[in-house]
Amino acid sequence: MNWEVGSGLNIASVLIVVIVIAAMLIWVERRLLGFWQDRLGPNRVGPFGLLQVVADMIKIFTKEDWVPPFSDRFSFVLAPGIIMIVILMSFSVIPFAPGVGVINSNIAVLFVLAMASLGAYSVMLGGLSSNNKYALLGSLRAAAQMVSYEVFMGISLLGVVALAGSFNLREIVVAQENGWFIVPQFVGFVIFLIAGVAESHRLPFDIPEAEQEICAGYHTEYSGMKFGMFFVGEYLGLVLISSLITVLFFGGWHGPLLPPIVWFVIKAAIFIAFFILLRAAIPRPRYDQLMTYGWLFLLPLSLLNLLITGALILL
Amino acid sequence: MSTLIKKSLFAKLLALVKDTLTSQVVSLWKVFRHLWVATDTVQYPEQQPYMFPRWRGRIILTRDPEGEERCVACNLCAVACPVDCIALQKTEDEAGRWYPEFFRINFSRCIMCGFCEEACPTNAIQLTPDFEMAEYKRQDMVWEKEDLLISGTGKYHESNFYRVSGKAIKGKDKGEARNESSPVDVRSLLP
């Protein structure tokens, strides 16, 4: 088998590694949250509790897969599939290392943004078809949050695109050979980080599934493997956002000494840990605060960032 | 008026940035530093927690220093028990000592309040720092006297009811108890 972008072996290994990492994150997150809260976290199953994931999977597979009789069955079953498919599709354009990746696409940035937008359908349909008021409230919030944060998520990336002169993520990484885009695009990075948290509805922006207010939000009625797909989908989103930040602002696979793929994994892992730290430290804002913050502060800021970047490139 | 609004909007913006830097970033850093703080967790089955000597746990029945049962079956513990988990029946041996024929504690009801220990006049019933009393069957939570009775004196090593009380038993007549004077012959007081 040849090892180049798009080969069968490449696709299979990317798929398997990404899903396994997303599943392992369940354990990583609980462990890290434990340490940050002066606890130990799950450490019983296997060495360091590593097999906790296996135990969780066995539990989730053997649970009753219940479809509420009052739900809209078709979209209820469809919704958790969408988020998995959409986020796994996004991984296809991520350049992990030279020669490692699924597609070398010219419209990779647009593709990722498009897939992120489609992800909104998953939570919307999930909440809507559940026929449950908490689920509906959750999907309502999710839809509003994701749609509004997508706007400047895209705009904050345009500075990077303008600097690299390409929508191709692989070329964006190559363009960072002599300097990461975090330096000229720091504002863009901060906005993308915040938008990324909101987009993957992780804490502190997990308003669609705020447990304390609306049960579990859009996946209140889900159980068994359908819930598991939402759950793993959330972690896949976390991996995706971390990979995107690495690719767009932190020079992707570039780094001294170590092989490129190792650098990519290290950088992405740091951001995954950072997102978990956000969960451990920052309380959830109110719903209207989130929207106001997005539309009245981050959107003008991202536009200003794009304007200044464009002006400096033209000068 | 318009300047006031403008100013307040700018002040709001400034406050937001200041809040992000001072509150959010600082709390992120403070939480991150907890990575190096020792955990408070006690890894229970391997690492036993320190149990205080006066912890109210598993209930025992003790014996006096002579090795006899302390319990005199007075029923005060059963009366004091708020959940009625103690049941016993009084009987008497040939020496004249009272003792429980059976003594039963239903630990599935017991709330470890320690009222029985407070009520006991002979220090017979005592609570211990043992809390590992899980059973698979509910019926196994009912403990009989042979389960409760230990061979030692428990917390109070000197306490010996029949040696201080006026009750006559075999081998100890009236007036022979500790600090007890001989019974007064009331007829000798007559003029």
Image (cartoon, coloured by chain):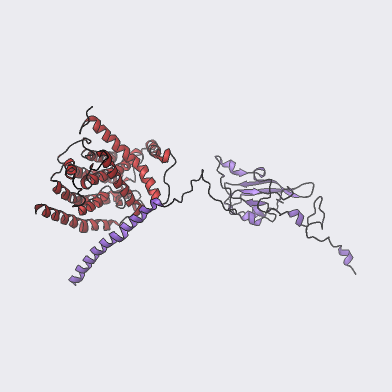
Chain colours: A red, B purple
Residue depicted at x 19% and y 68%: B6
Q: Quadrant of residue A103?
A: top left
Q: Residue furthest bottom?
A: B1
Q: Residue furthest right?
A: B191
* Residue B152 drawn at (x, y percent): 68, 47
Q: In screen coordinates, is B29 left or right of B165?
A: left
Figure quadrant of the N terminus of chain A: top left
Figure quadrant of the C terminus of chain A: bottom left
Q: In screen coordinates, is A41 left or right of A132?
A: right
Q: Residue furthest top?
A: A1
In the depicted view, which residue is nearer to us: B106 or A186? A186
Where B121 falls versus B100 (above or below)?
A: below
* Residue B85 drawn at (x, y percent): 61, 49
* Residue A203 drawn at (x, y percent): 31, 51
In the depicted view, which residue is nearer to us: B104 or B150? B150
In the depicted view, which residue is nearer to us: A219 or A46? A46
In the depicted view, which residue is nearer to us: A121 or B172? B172
Q: In screen coordinates, is A142 left or right of A224?
A: left
* Residue A80 drawn at (x, y percent): 29, 40
Q: Is residue A258 visible?
A: yes
Residue depicted at x 62% and y 47%: B105
Residue depicted at x 33% and y 43%: A231
Q: Is residue A67 visible?
A: no
Q: Residue furthest front?
A: A257
Q: Quadrant of residue B20?
A: bottom left
